[in-house]
Every structure is written in structure tokens, then in C-alpha cells.
Amino acid sequence: MAPELNVVLLVVGRVLFGGVLAFTGLSHFTQTEQMAGYAEYKGLPAPRFSVLASGGLLILGGLGVTVGVFPVVAAVALAVFLIVSAVAMHDFWAVPDEDRQDELNSFLKNVTLAGGALVVAASATGTWALSVGISPL
């Protein structure tokens, strides 16, 4: 594949992946009360704080991936959050039958996104095209 195409694919992928996660984080601030209610229902401690903290992590992590600021740290943080969120919030094995498919879909979405975040982390260990070039590795 041509190097120019690799750069285009990398940048578009970063914008799609990181941008969507950052945008998702914004909803944690615009829908805090609804999300805190759901977090409380799921038994999360300090539900309002958890919603706001996770929103901040999604925004910072998503932007880190998108613009290339500590992209490895950002992507690994996103992966950890997504796995924890999958298990804590989308426990399809413990819900009534009528809710099982929705929770399973959300669980699988989070696990898939976590896998994508780990792929991003692996690809961000070298020089990253069109980034600000701040990386600890």
C-alpha cells in the first residue's frame, strides 16, 4: 500500500475512533442525571461522580487518540474503561430475559471498542503521522 494511503487511513481511523468516543463522553455531561440514575441502578458507587469522571476520560482519551497526544496512554485508558464498563454496566448474564439482548449488544460493543483501542495503542508506539508527537513510548 502506498505510504500516502496509509497516512490517510490512519488519520481517518483516528478521527472516527477517537472522535466518536470523545463525542460519547460529551453526553456524560449533557445527560448526567439520566446516566447517574442508570449507574445507581447498576450499583455503581458514587454514580454522579462516576458518570462525570468517565465522561472526562472518554473526552480526553478520544482527543488524545485523534490528535496524537500521548496516544498510547489515551488508547490503553480507553480500553481499560471500556472493559470495566462492559462488565459493570452491561451484565447481560444477570438481567431479565427481555433485557438480555440489549445488554449483550452493549457488552459486545464495548469489548469490540476495547480491542480497537488496543490496536490503536499498538500502532501508536512509533512515529504517528499528523500528530502533535507527544508520546511516552
Image (cartoon, rainbow, N blue to C red):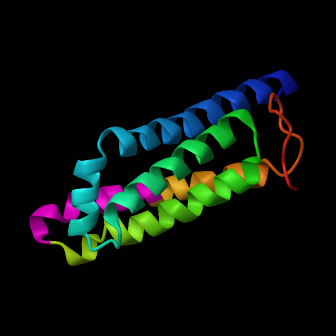
Between 4 and 19, the one lying in front of the other is: 19
Q: Magenta region: which residues?
A: 96-110
Seen in the picture, residue 132 relative to 65 is either above or below; the reply is above
Query: Percent from the top left, x then y, of residue 87?
Result: 39, 71
* Left or right placement of residue 94 versus residue 50 in this view: left
Indicate yes or no whether the magenta region holds residue 100: yes
Work out whether 3 lies above or below 75.
above
Viewer-proximal residue among 45 and 99: 45
Q: State whether the magenta stretch is mostly helix, strand or loop.
A: helix
Observer-nearest residue: 134 or 94?
134
- Is 51 positioned to the left or the right of 1 in the image? left
- Quadrant of image for the C terminus: bottom right
Where residue 26 appears, as percent x and y from the top left, is 43, 38
| Image coords of residue 57 (percent x, y) | 54, 52
Q: Image quadrant of residue 66?
A: top right
Asked if residue 39 lies in the magenta stretch, the reply is no
| Residue 39, above or below 87 | above
